[in-house]
Amino acid sequence: MTTCRRISQLLLLAPLALPLALLSGCAANNGPPADPTPPIELADPLIGSGGRLLAIGSTSVSATVPFGMVKPGPDTTTAKELLATDRLSGYNYNDELITAFSQLHIHGAGIADYGVLGVMPTRGFSAAKTDERGYRAAVDKASEVAAPGYYAATLAEHDIKAELTATSRVALHRYTFNRPSDDDYLLVDAAHVINSCKVSEATIAVDAARGELSGSLRYQGGFTARYGGLRVFFVIKVDQDITSWSLWQQGELLPQATSARASDDAGVRLGAAIRVDSSRPVVLKIGISFVDLAGARANLEQEAAAKDFETVRGEASAAWADALASITVAGGSQAQRRIFYSALYHAHLSPATFSDVDGRFRFLDKISEARGFTFYSDLTLWDTYRTVHPLFNLVQPRVQRDIVRSLLEMHALGGHLPRCPVGPGYGGCMISTPADIVISESYLKGITDFDVDAAYQAMLQNATTPVAHGGRAEVQSYVKLGYVPGDLVSGSVARTQENGIADAAIAKLAAKLGFDNQAQQLEARAKGYRKLWDPALGFVRGKKADGSWLVPADKFDPVDVAAAATISSNEYVEGTAWQYLWLAPHDPAGLAEMLGGKAAFVERLETFFSSKETNFLAKKIGYSSYYWHGNEPVLHSAYLFALAGAPQRTQYWVHQIMSHSYSTEVDGLAGNDDCGTLSSWYLFSAAGFYPIAGQTRYVIGSPIFSRVRLRLTGGKVLEIKADGASAENIYVQSAKLDGKPLSSPELSHDAIRDGATLELTMGASPSQWGE
């Protein structure tokens, strides 16, 4: 399948040679030869776009640029009417029907949202085609091409080729009617949605003299409905005269009408059908803004008005070539390199730009201006704090700085730091205050160009004060008791642990800023998870406010699948007691001591990984009560072996995870990618080291490549040389950092931030290195 999806149509520009140039010295130093295939051809957006049930990546196949505002792409369905969860991003590779090509998508989320403003070519127009069931069309899967910055597919019935590309804020569509007629149309559906989302109000207008359509809409999806809906403004330029058209409003046709609007809390139906001259390709340029119509028009004029489709496609390709040059690899198999560069591609899809070309942005219906930075949103921080932001701290520091500034703007406009900002509002998903971890870690790793005093005060607010629509549930009880009581709020164990990770990160920042007393208080509170330890049962368990156990011992089930399948049980969040046993990455020594010492800890962790119920092949259906790579709370756990004196088991299990939970196929991810979280785990693990979120430490694992080069700020490079690395040689025999012997499996950020060379000698047998 992968071979059939290789991208031969890409416009290969000079920047594509950059990754090869960075590795050109390897052969001269007797290292592995560089793969002649450019990374942009290895990156496959279709990886993770298929699958079923919980084992679906929900990846976006849309045409976009790194961190782009717009992501024009196909939304799909099937006549089989399978589960809506199979297409939370709007698309599933296994679907046979395209419902429309919409302009905004979220990458890898576990909740359906976006799929905004549908466009669809069709033959003939009637009232039946004011609904997607009337205009959706079968796709010729053999024609489908998804590449960084470009998407194409042919609609089978009328042989219409659709092509998409984008600038940051403008979507470009090109439709070629291979069998043209005088009855061909482009439909613009302002009320197009995916899954059970809705558009509650919309406007649309046609200006034939200017050759444009324009309008606005309020979209309410799984995230955005939580703050009243996403307001979107659009301007569409058509590259031919508009002479014949019809609007539709709640199913009624309005021939040659110049404007229409609709409002209905249950959802509206509003759009336009434009008759086109299909004897030549038809190109649309769609400017989007979340501020106003003037912003959408300015975005279009500045970014795309003077450019044709191929020029924009080439610029998008060049932008991706540069992003994919941030990490270069040599060695490994081509399949591993394909997975790696697809993961690096996925990691650059989020966050999304939300400020216009003039810097204006909207948050909670307040308009402000981003001065000297890009305002970003679409950050599922409970997921991304673990892997994505540590990656950006290394290879995208400017983007990470702007993420921090954006979070602080959200605090200024909304009153508190967000947990899950999606669009211009608080998405409100998941638990605790992961923004504390993201901001603290950024500062500790040298990204300091933001108001750290304001940030610190915002984090203290999170750590001590209840806030609406965010913050820490039962924070006052947490401060008083040292744990979150399960009789007052669900997910109490998980909340206690996540609060502890956040408190540990704030404590590090407090110490850096000289607030020693607060640092000590926060550091002590970060160990509150220990108060939930039940030595009789051997798990962290929920307690009531009075200190008694929430669940009687004879009713406690550490592998309760039913509870784990919900967002929050009384004790855990999307997980079991086995999975949450390890959630103290900030306190590995304390965790090991709690479990009876390092030897007992390693034995218990080995049981967690080796249990027959773990079964990595369960990714096909998506769930295990033990180690399950498809969800975030366990992602760090393989690296705990190394921190407990058993780095060989880290090396073994990390390879098992990479081998069984990632592939080059459309079901090549074990679960939702969650804005690049699973992809970033692979990037770190394949490179040979892994971050401890909220801290300034990394754990050495087992690289699959012989050479890895990370492009750091200021032209500096972190290089990892793994002599002898192969499918068999997975164990580290010895290590050097900048030529000096390294006996510990830990690295400090300070040791690598200005560039460094980590040399690992690999072998087929476990060694005593790092014990």
Image (cartoon, rainbow, N blue to C red):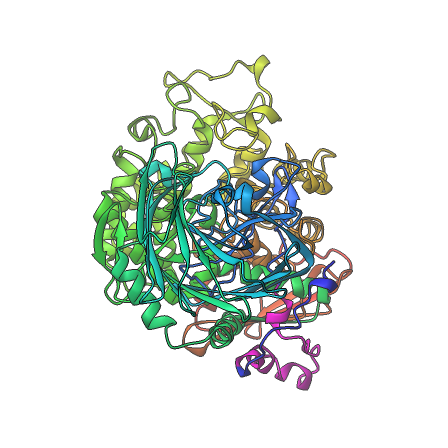
Look at the image and tell me whether residue 349 can be seen: yes
State the residue at coordinates (56%, 29%). Answer: 564
- In the displayed structure image, the side of residue 459 where residue 66 appears, left or right: right
Q: Position of residue 447 (x, y in %)?
A: 34, 63
Q: Position of residue 414 (x, y in %)?
A: 24, 44
- In the displayed structure image, the side of residue 269 where residue 669 appears, left or right: right
In the image shown, does 73 or 623 lie closer to the viewer?
73
Q: Where is residue 35 in the image (x, y as percent from the top left)?
A: 68, 75
Residue at the bottom extreme of this rendering = 28
State the residue at coordinates (57%, 20%). Answer: 536
The picture quadrant where one finds residue 375 is bottom left
Q: Is residue 242 above or below residue 8?
A: above
In the image shown, does 149 or 384 lie closer to the viewer?
149
Question: How many circles with numbers are drawn on the protein?
Answer: 0
- In the displayed structure image, the side of residue 119 where residue 483 appears, left or right: left
In the image shown, does 78 or 362 lie closer to the viewer?
78
Image: magenta residue range: 15-43
Q: Where is residue 72 in the image (x, y as percent from the top left)?
A: 48, 58
Does the magenta segment cover residue 29?
A: yes
Look at the image and tell me whether residue 703 can be seen: no
Q: In which quarter of the image is the N terminus?
A: bottom right
Does the magenta segment cover residue 99?
A: no
